[in-house]
Image (cartoon, rainbow, N blue to C red):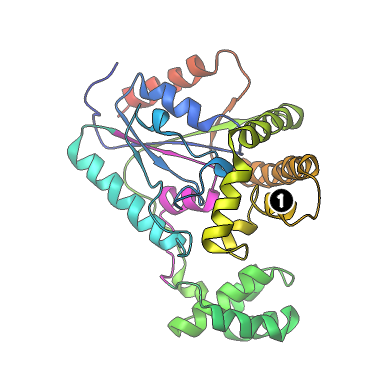
Amino acid sequence: MQGQAGPPCLIVIGGATATGKTGLSLQLAKRLPLSILSADSRLVYRGFDIGTAKPIAAERSQAPHYLIDICDPTTTMTVAAYQQQAQGLIRQLHDSRERIPCLVGGTGLYISAVVDGLQIPPVSPQSVLRSQLSQLGQAQCHAMLRQLDPPAGDRIHPNDAVRTIRALEVAYVTGQPLSRQQGKHPPPYPILYIGLDSDSDGLKARIEARTAHMLAQGLVQEVKMLCDRYGADLPLLKTLGYSEVVGYLAGDYSLAEAEQLIVQHTCQFAKRQRTWFRKRPIHWFDAHATTLLDQVWAKVEDFLSRL
């Protein structure tokens, strides 16, 4: 059913890690003229391939892929920068009417930035300011926030150091409270929001299999290369799947123990993702269903017929 894309729209495939989002998008790309936009906060970085389950060249050749390998690991891709690039690509695809944009990934904030049209203050991380605020302690920082930005202080939990410091950072850099700069402007085009879910046992089995595959594909060698090039203190090397291998290379534990830690930490991460996505207005599908593609395709056809 390849052909013209038709009226402007967006298809989103979200869900927890290891639920098969990439595979589903590629299956749909065989039936529709799709352009796949990654919504994964680590796929944007060059060199972080195996540990992020980045689509390989053969997969990317099946449909145009965007927002992958677009910045160096020593830089920071902010949500605002991601949003700007994603929205620009979607506009281009809509203008050309040749392909349907399909946003695929598990980074909820990236997806929300596009789907909800979040207003995001364009303030990059301020390392010196963050360090100074951290030294004050969370209790004092939150008290400062309640003074500077009472609505944000009420909304952000007193123990949430990350969001507290971010709110203070935005306020100090822009001179305006974060609460005055936030809002939503959903896009005008129709959106089909598909979610893949799995029960805990099924998801753990998938995570175990994928972790074993990553190690077999050379994850340890990839981490060694990244450590040699950027140093083990690179922030991205402290993320899921990489920090555990860094620990193994440092002699903190065996490779088998590192593998167990990756599985454990990935399951914990997936649980948080599932909690976040469950709050969204999503059409859910069982990732393990033998008729998954047929079920999703029926929903896509219905969606497109109504445009």
Label 1 crowd (10 A; few <14 / some 14-19 / many >=20): many
Q: Position of residue 267 (x, y in %)?
A: 72, 41
- Where is the C terminus found, in terms of image quarters? top left
Local secondary structure at mark 1: helix
Residue at 54% across / 18% down in the picture? Answer: 292
- Can residue 276 be seen from the camera position used here? yes
Look at mark 1 in the image and give the residue it sits on: 244
Q: Where does the N terminus fall, quadrant-wise?
A: top left
Residue found at x 21% / y 25%: 4
User: In the figure, residue 80 lies in which quadrant?
Assistant: bottom left
Q: Nearer the viewer, residue 289 or 306?
A: 289
Q: Nearer the viewer, residue 18 or 51?
A: 51
Residue drawn at (44%, 73%) of the image: 123
Q: Nearer the viewer, residue 123 or 253?
A: 253
Figure disc tally: 1
Determine the image quadrant of residue 185: bottom left
Q: Amino acid at mark 1?
A: Glu
Q: Does 235 appear in magenta?
A: no
Q: Would you place residue 215 above or below residue 287 in this image?
A: below
Query: In x, y percent, where is residue 278?
Result: 63, 41
